[in-house]
Amino acid sequence: YCVEFQLVALTPGCLQSQPSYTHWMRHLREGHRVCVECQQPALHLPRQHCRGDGTGSQQNQLLHWQAVGNHRCRGTWRRIRQLDTCSCPSVHSFLFI
């Protein structure tokens, strides 16, 4: 499954990514919607959910995230909805880990 989030706040460290494998962080913008997929090995049994997917959060609650590969890139987002079938655009698609 996938979860759609709206980015609320980002640290400046997201724009200062140096290694080529972190250049995707430069595409993050406050207000954009992103899609995050939950798949193995991040899928926790028996609940069949990824930690951090916002299940059970209050509507409009801000949730925290951090990027892998650049510890200075983190922020908050708001859960919009869960999608049972993932059809996320590649530029704004991510994985839970």
Image (spheres, rainbow, N blue to C red):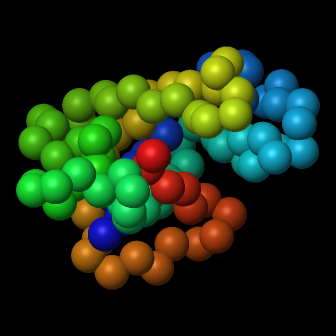
Viewer-side residue, 90 vs 44: 44
Viewer-side residue, 86 vs 40: 40
Viewer-side residue, 9 vs 19: 19
Q: Quadrant of residue 60?
A: top left
Residue lying at 64% horizontally and 21% vertically, measured from the top left: 71
Q: Classify residue 54 as left or right of residue 34.
A: left
Q: Classify residue 59 as left or right of residue 30.
A: left
Vertical placement of 73 versus 87: above or below? above
Residue lying at 26% horizontally and 63% vertically, measured from the top left: 82
- The quadrant in which the N terminus is found is bottom left
Query: Is residue 18 visible from the viewing direction of this image?
Result: yes
Viewer-side residue, 87 vs 1: 1
Vertical placement of 28 versus 4: above or below? above
Q: Position of residue 51 (x, y in %)?
A: 28, 42
Q: Position of residue 8 (x, y in %)?
A: 47, 33
Q: Quadrant of residue 45?
A: bottom left
Vertical placement of 46 versus 63: above or below? below
Query: Is residue 9 visible from the viewing direction of this image?
Result: no
Q: Classify residue 26 as left or right of residue 3.
A: right
Vertical placement of 41 versus 9: above or below? below
Residue lying at 23% horizontally and 31% vertically, measured from the top left: 61
Residue lying at 39% horizontally and 27% vertically, measured from the top left: 64
Mark count? 0
Q: Classify residue 15 as left or right of residue 85.
A: right
Q: Position of residue 53 (x, y in %)?
A: 29, 46
Q: Position of residue 84 (x, y in %)?
A: 26, 76
